[in-house]
Image: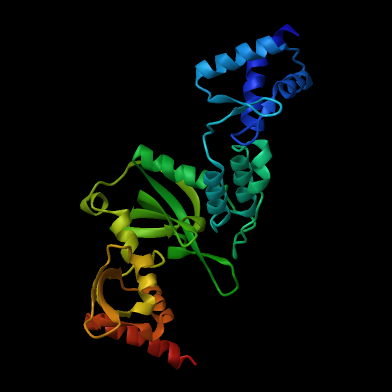
Amino acid sequence: MASSQKLKLLYLMDILRTETDPDHGVSMADILQKLEERGISAERKGIYSDIETLREFGLDIRKYQRQPVEYALAERDFELSELMLLVDAVQSSRFLSEGSCKALVKSIRGLASTPVRDALHKQVHVHGRPRVQTQSDFIVVDKLQEAMAARRKISFGYFRYDIHKNKVATRDGATHVVTPVNLTYSDGNYYLVAFSDADQEIRNYRVDRMERIEQLDERAERNDAISSYDPDEVGKCVFGMYHGERVTATLRATENVMNVIVDRFGRDVHAVPIEGENAARVTVTVKESPVFYGWLAQLGSEIQIEAPASLREGYLAFLRDILQSY
């Protein structure tokens, strides 16, 4: 019993953290009952003193003049709206397997008080989410983060899928050795941005297609390509993290698709209204790729490439190849 009494303050703090928030409190009778359930015998006078101690420790415990009077932890680490955003972000990630997603959501729900946890019990369906991963999702990301923090190179195997949905190792199974530069989240997937020893340039790798990841003793490369890498700037010109030639393009876009333009390139995108037309001339930097051409195609005749000519020809060739296959 003596050891249980020593735990009274910790149990009280746990009750306030898990059972209360600004909208839901516990009465003194509730507190005494919950402590009794935990094997702690307490008196009101002692609880008042303990609450003051917790306030001095820094907890924002407030007294609400309700019927009956209630006590609650008013300031929490996360607001309910913030926890909802976290749950949505986790459940919308295609990178996470079902098991990892459920485990992470459970941890997030644990940050909320018991009365509001049901509000976080929702499901966002993500088409194509893997049921299981060959490695723990969190361990993979941890390994990559550790290598970047230690400034070490990593090695890994990389694969693609064949027509039978079987894994096929790229480069005939040769191990990739790279300097990790950055982790990027794009289109529901994690990508490792890294400087490739073999290619001597920055490459993007889907994290869920990396296997046998190992941190090497070899120090990370230091060069201009790595030091000049800007993830925000690159994110505006890369489509689907696809590698391609960097091009400054002039596009003619009607007002109908300006929302799409701004969503993709940001509010600071260079756009000049065309006099006498309900359209604007937009200048953007992109990486030429089938993914970029596909993005253009979904906007149909509402957008056209004006320059450079090489990009126009590339887009025409892309469309012709599609038409010829039918």
Q: Quadrant of residue 172?
A: bottom left
Q: Can I make out residue 238 in this image?
A: no
**Any part of residue 259 in sight:** yes
Using residue 192 as the reference point, say whether residue 67 is left or right of it: right
Residue 271 image point, x, y percent: 25, 71
**Which residue is at the front of the view, 282 or 27?**
27
Which one is nearer the viewer's eye here, 301 or 151?
Answer: 301
Q: Is residue 106 left or right of residue 169?
A: right
Residue located 57% across and 15% down the image:
52
Q: Residue at x 60, y 17 (%)?
A: 51
Locate residue 122, reporting x and y percent: 65, 53
Residue at x-position 57% and y-position 25%: 62
Residue 124 found in image quarter: bottom right
**Quadrant housing residue 166:** bottom right
Q: Position of residue 199 (x, y in %)?
A: 31, 60
**Applied colour scheme:** rainbow
Number of numbered labels in the structure image: 0
Q: Of 313 and 199, which appears nearest the observer?
A: 313
Residue at the image position 52 percent from the left and 38 percent from the top? 78
Quadrant containing the N terminus in the rendered view: top right
In this picture, is 47 found above or below 254?
above
Q: Position of residue 46 (x, y in %)?
A: 66, 10
